Image: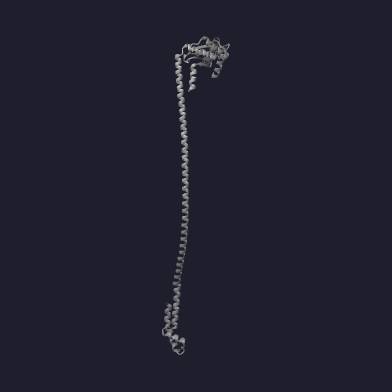
């Protein structure tokens, strides 16, 4: 602004110069260029003023470009770059997400297969254990039955032997009592004679 | 005196008491008289007990103790004693005792040997074989 003020302050001098020039050379400024200048002059446009305005505009443009447009463009480019980066990151994230989803699905399928396999193995093992337990129980049952049968048979034989022994003992005791009561001395004497003869043999 | 010493001494005394392989009453009296003089009282009691057991055993070796049911003729008893004298190679005299629980026959004990020819033993064996 100081510069513009200085230019405006200096404008009367320029107008004085121009007035001197107009006065001195109206006869010299004929031709097409002179007509054009005259035409612009009739619209209030003169060269020095135009020059000053051009310089002012250039300075203004430079200042605007330097301190407003260029930073704004830089920020815009930065925003664009950030948006592009965000887009790239988003794409990468989406790709990673898709990959992770595929991996998770694959793992899920594998886990499901593994679980099914483990379940089948467990069922087989349980079945085998049940079969083994059944076989063992049957063997134990057979063994118990055999032992019980053997014990019963042994008890039966023992009982029969005891009965036989008891009957024999009773028979012999009865026979002994009968003999003791019924044998007379003559019969006992004959038995003694027989025993003596047996001893002599 | 230890028990082994007592047994050995009693055995020696028994040998001194035999005459012709049989126990002699005179020799036994002599042995007892000598013992009562030569031995103190505390040694005499176990020695006399062992000597008495030996004398009894020796006397039993010379006897055929016949347990019989019913009557047993003297000739049969002599025959039994003669049989055991012949078998054992020494003189054995019969000592008979009646026991009708034997039912019939007789049982002879000579020393530690027993011969049983009784009907009760046969019945017992029969019961054992049946049971």
| Residue A15 seen in the current view | no
Residue at image location 47% in from the left, 57% down from the top = A102
Q: Quadrant of residue A152?
A: top left
B101 and A73: which is toward the camera: B101
Q: Residue furthest bottom?
A: A27
Say how many tags the image has: 0
In the picture, the quarter occupied by the N terminus of chain B is top right
Position of residue B76 measured from the top left corner of the image (x, y, whole percent): 52, 11
Q: How is the image coloured?
A: one colour
Position of residue A58 measured from the top left corner of the image (x, y, whole percent): 45, 77
As displayed, is residue B33 above or below residue A152? above
Q: Residue furthest left?
A: A43
Residue at image location 49% in from the left, 20% down from the top = B126
A193 and B25: which is toward the camera: A193
Left or right: B92 as drawn, with respect to A142: right
B97 and A191: which is toward the camera: A191
As displayed, is residue A57 above or below residue B47? below
Position of residue B88 measured from the top left corner of the image (x, y, whole percent): 57, 14
B108 and A174: which is toward the camera: A174
As displayed, is residue A21 above or below residue A97? below
Residue at image location 46% in from the left, 87% down from the top = A32
Position of residue B34 measured from the top left corner of the image (x, y, whole percent): 55, 11
| Residue A178 seen in the current view | yes
As displayed, is residue A154 above or below residue B74? below
């Amino acid at each position: 602004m100081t510069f513009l003020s200085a230019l405006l302050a200096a404008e009367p001098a320029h107008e004085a110069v121009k007035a001197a020039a107009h006065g001195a050379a109206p006869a010299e400024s004929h031709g097409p260029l002179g007509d054009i200048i005259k035409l612009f002059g009739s619209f209030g446009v003169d060269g020095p003023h135009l020059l000053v305005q051009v310089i002012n505009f250039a300075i203004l443009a430079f200042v605007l470009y330097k301190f407003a447009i260029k930073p704004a463009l830089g920020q815009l480019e930065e925003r664009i770059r950030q948006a592009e980066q965000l887009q790239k990151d988003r794409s990468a994230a989406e790709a990673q997400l898709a990959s992770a989803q595929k991996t998770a699905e694959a793992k899920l399928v594998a886990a499901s297969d593994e679980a099914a396999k483990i379940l089948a193995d467990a069922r087989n093992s349980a079945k085998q254990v049940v079969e083994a337990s059944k076989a063992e129980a049957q063997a134990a049952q057979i063994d118990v039955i055999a032992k019980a049968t053997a014990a019963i048979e042994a008890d039966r034989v023992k009982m029969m032997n005891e009965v036989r022994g008891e009957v024999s003992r009773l028979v012999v005791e009865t026979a002994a009592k009968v003999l003791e009561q019924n044998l007379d001395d003559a019969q006992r004497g004959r038995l003694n004679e027989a025993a003596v003869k047996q001893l002599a043999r | 005196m230890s028990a082994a010493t007592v047994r050995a001494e009693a055995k020696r005394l028994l040998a001194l008491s035999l005459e012709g392989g049989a126990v002699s009453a005179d020799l036994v009296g002599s042995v007892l008289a000598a013992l009562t003089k030569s031995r103190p009282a505390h040694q005499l009691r176990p020695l006399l007990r062992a000597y008495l057991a030996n004398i009894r055993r020796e006397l039993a070796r010379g006897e055929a103790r016949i347990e019989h049911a019913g009557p047993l003729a003297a000739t049969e008893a002599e025959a039994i004693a003669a049989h055991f004298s012949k078998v054992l190679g020494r003189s054995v005299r019969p000592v008979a005792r009646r026991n009708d629980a034997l039912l019939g026959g007789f049982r002879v004990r000579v020393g530690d040997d027993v011969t049983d020819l009784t009907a009760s033993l046969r019945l017992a064996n029969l019961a054992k074989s049946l049971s």
